[in-house]
Image: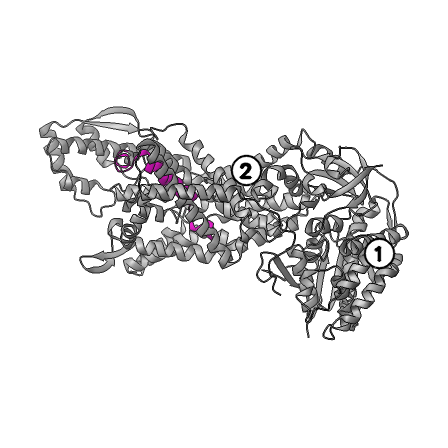
Amino acid sequence: MNTLREAKVGQNLRVVKIHGDGAVKRRIMDMGITKGIELHVRKVAPLGDPVEVTVRNYELTIRRSDAEIIQTEVV
Amino acid sequence: MRIKIALAGNPNSGKTTLFNALTGSNQFVGNWPGVTVEKKEGGLKGHKDVTLTDLPGIYSLSPYTLEEVVARNYLLKEKPDAILNIVDGTNLERNLYLTTQLLELGIPVVVAVNMMDVVNKNGDKIHVKKLAEELGCEVVEISALKGTGIKEAANRAVALAEQKKAMKSVHTFSSRIEEALNAIEAKLPDSVPEEQRRFFAIKLFERDDKVKEQLKPVPDVEDIVTAAEEELDDDSESIITNERYTFISSIITDCYTKKSKNKQTISDKIDRIVTNRWLALPIFAVVMFVVYFVSVTTVGTILTDWTNDGLFGDGWHLLDIGAAEYADASDAYSLERTKIDAYLAAAEESGIDVEAVTEALDPETENPDASAVTAFEEEAAAAGIEGTAEIYNDEGEIEETFPVSLEDFQTAAQAEEPDPANYGVWVPGLPGLIKSGLESINCAPWLEGLILDGIVAGVGAVLGFVPQMLVLFIFLAFLESCGYMARIAFIMDRIFRKFGLSGKSFIPMLIGTGCGIPGVMASRTIENERDRRMTIMTTTFIPCGAKLPIIALIAGALFHNAWWVAPSAYFVGIAAIVVSGIILKKTKMFSGEPAPFVMELPAYHWPTVGNVLRSMWERGWSFIKKAGTVILLSTIFIWFVSNFGVVDGQFQMVEDLSDGLLAVIGRFIAPIFSPLGWGEWRASVAAITGLVAKENVVGTFGILYGFAEVAENGWEIWGTLSSSFTGLSAYSFLVFNLLCAPCFAAMGAIKREMNSAKWFWFAIGYQTIFAYLVSMCVYQIGMLVTAGSFGVATVISLIVLVAFFYLLFRPYKESQRLEKEVRV
C-alpha cells in the first residue's frame, strides 16, 4: 500500500482512502484531504519530517507518522 | 436587550484584523472559562448595543480540539443572534468547509469574503450573488486590511440579528444520508429546539461524543448509523466530511473564476527560499539571532538596566550625558577608597586601633569626627606605617599591587564621593525621589523600609521586565502575523515533538536563556494547549542570565573555575526539559488532548503596524495585570521576613539578616536539604532569597558571611564557601537552584500563562520537587561512587532513579479524543 508517508518531493498523488479513525483522521479530512483529491508533495522539512503538501490550493504540513493513514496513488 | 454577534472563521483568515477594525479600542480580553484559550469581546463601532465576540480561529466544529469545542459550545449554548463568518477569498474551498457547518446551527450567518483586494489583484473573480444563492445566506466582499466593505458586513449581521429569524440550511447531503438524518431527527428529545435539531442529528450521526454530553436522554441511533455506514462503506464521520467537500467542489466552479493556473505568487517565491531544504536552518538561525540579539542582548538589556538601575534604582544620565565622566570619577574615587582600606589594614596589623578612624572615614557616617582622623594620622606617622594596596580583577586574582604611604592616605582621606547629579543631565530614580519625600514628612523607618524596599522594589520587579518584554512581543507579533512562525513549527517539529513540545517551543527556550519571564510569555504563540503548558513548565529550566552568577560562584569557589561547570549547567537544563517533556507527556494531566500536527502554512504577508502594536500591548498589559499582584506580594513578604525578627525577646526591625525571620525559616527548613548535602541554614536562606531574583543567592551568601557587598560572582566568599561545601554538595546546590521554582516574576508569568491556579501550583510544585529529587540523586549517588557512603537516603535516591527510568520508558499511546471537560 502506498501512503503519503513514503511520498517523494515533487510527486502528484491522488488520495485513494483514508484509514484509521478518531482525531487524526478527522483533522486530516477537515483540512480538505478527502477521497479522490489530488495532492502535490511540495517539500520536506530540513530534518526530513514533516512534509508539506499543496491541497485545495493551499499549503498544508503533516507529519509522516500521521500521513501514514493516507493511502495514495501516483497520478 | 444587547445583541450578540459571534465572529467566526479559520485561523489566518484575517479575523483579528477584522475584529480590531470593527471594535477599535473598545475591547475586553479574557479567557474562555477553564481553558487558556483567549476570549475577546468588543462593542461594535457605531452600534451601541451590539457585542462582538471573537471566537477562536477554527477549521471545523469537530469534538477533538479545545478551540473547536469552545467555539461550538458557545454557539449552541449562548446562542448569539448572528454569526459573522469571515472566509479567506484566496482560499475559498477550505474556508467554506467551516461555513457549511455554521449554517446548520440555526443562527443567521453573514459570510464576509475577505482579502478581496488580493483576489482582484490576482485577476480572479468571486461571484458573490451566486455564492449567496448556493449557501443560502448573505455574502459580502470585504478587505479587512484596507477596511473596505467591513461596515456593510457588520450592518448586515446586525440587521439579521434584529430580525431574530432562525436560519434554515439549504445545503443538503446525498439522499441516503438525508434519510438517516431525518430518522435521527425524529428520535431527538423534544427539549432540543427546532432550529438546532438538524445540527444535533448530524452530530449524532457522526457519533460525536461531546454532543452526547449535551443531550438528555441520548437517543439510540446506532442502528441507523451502522446501516448507512455499511451501505456507503466508510465511517459516518468521514461520510459527512466527504459530502461537505463534495458540495463545496460542486459550487466552487460556478462561484469562483481563476484567471491563471499555477502561477507562482510572491509568497510561493519567498517560501521556496525560506523553507528550502538547505537554506531553512541557516535562515532560521539568522532570524533567531536577530530576535535574541535585539530583544535580549542589546535593546532588551539597555531597557531592563534602565528600568531596574535607573527608573527603579539610583537614577540615570539622560541620553548618557555625563555618564562617562561620572564613571571615571567614580573609578578614581574607588581607587582612593582601596588605598584607605589598605592603609588601615596595615595599621591595624601593627596594633593601632582603627575603629574610630574607620567610622570617621565611612562615607555613610553623618558628621564624621575629623579629630579621629588627625589622631590616627599622628599615630600612624609615629609608627611609620606603610600599606600595600591590591587591585583585584573579576576572578578575585590580584592584578596589581602598589605601596600606600601616609601621604597617599592623607590625600585619599580628602577624596569626596562623586555625586552623579554633578555630571551631565542626571535624572534621579523613583526610590530616591520617594525617599526624600518620605524623609521630609518624617516617616517612620519601618514604613519607609516597607515603601522603598518592599513596595517600590516590588513594583520595580514587576515593571522592570516590561520594556524588554515589549520589544520581544513586537518580534513575536511580527513573526506570527507575517506567517514565519508557522514555518518555525514546520522546521523544528522533528526535534521538539519527541518531548511533547511544539516546534514553536524553540523561541520560549531561546529567550529563556536570557530571561525566563519573557520566555514564558513567549509561549503564547503556541496554539495547542498541551504543548503550551508543557513549554511554560519547562522553559525556566534553562539557565537564565540571573542564574549565571550562581554558576560563577560555585565554579569559582569549589571547582577552581573549571571550564566544564557552566556548560554542564546548560546541559542539566536541557536534560531537565527533555526528561520532563517525555515524563509529563505520558501523565494523565497531559495525555488527554490529541494533537495531530496537521497544520496550515499560511501565505506570507506584510503585517500592519497597528496589529503588531496592539498584540504587543495586549500581552504586555496582561503580564502587568495578571502577574503583578503575585510578584508584588511575594517581594513584600520576603522584605518583611528579611527585615523583621525577634531580638532580645522583642519583635522588631533587624539590622542583620541573620537575626531576621528569614533566618529562622532557613534554620527550620535546612534539615529538609540535608539529603541534598547542604542542610546548612545559610544555603536555605540564600535559596529562598533567590526566589526574589536568582542573582540574590550570591549577595545573600555574602551578607551571611559578613560582607556588606560582594562582586557579581562573589569571589570574596569563595574561600569561606569552599570550607562549608564539598564539591558534590555545591554542585547539588547549583542544580537545585537552576531547576527549582524560578524567581517570583517568572512565577507571575507562569501564573498568567497557565491562567489556572491548579496548573500554576502543579508547575511550581513539579519544578521544585523535580529539582529536589535530581539534586538528591546527584549528591547521594555521587557520594556512593566517590566515598562509598551508603544510607537510607542512598536507597531512596536509587529508588527515585529507577522510577525516573520507568516513567521515561513506559509505553504511551497518543489520545484519540479530547478527554477534558469544557465548561461554558
Q: Is residue B142 above or below residue B169?
A: above
Chain letter belonging to callout 2: B
Residue A25 percent coordinates (x, y): 72, 49
Give the residue pinned by disc 1. Answer: B231
Residue B809: mark: none
| Magenta range | B719-748
Q: Is residue B704 left or right of residue B811?
A: left
Number of labels in the image equals: 2
Chain letter belonging to callout 1: B
Inspect the image, locate mark 1, and give the three-letter code of the amino acid beneath it: Glu
Determine the CA span between mark 2 and mark 1: 58 Å
Question: Does the magenta portion include B280?
Answer: no
Residue B602 figure quarter: top right
Q: Is residue B100 left or right of residue B345?
A: right
Q: Is residue B76 left or right of residue B775?
A: right
Q: Secondary structure at mark 2?
A: helix
Residue B292: mark: 2
Q: Residue at x 62, y 34 (%)?
A: B284
Query: Foreground: B50 or B243?
Result: B243
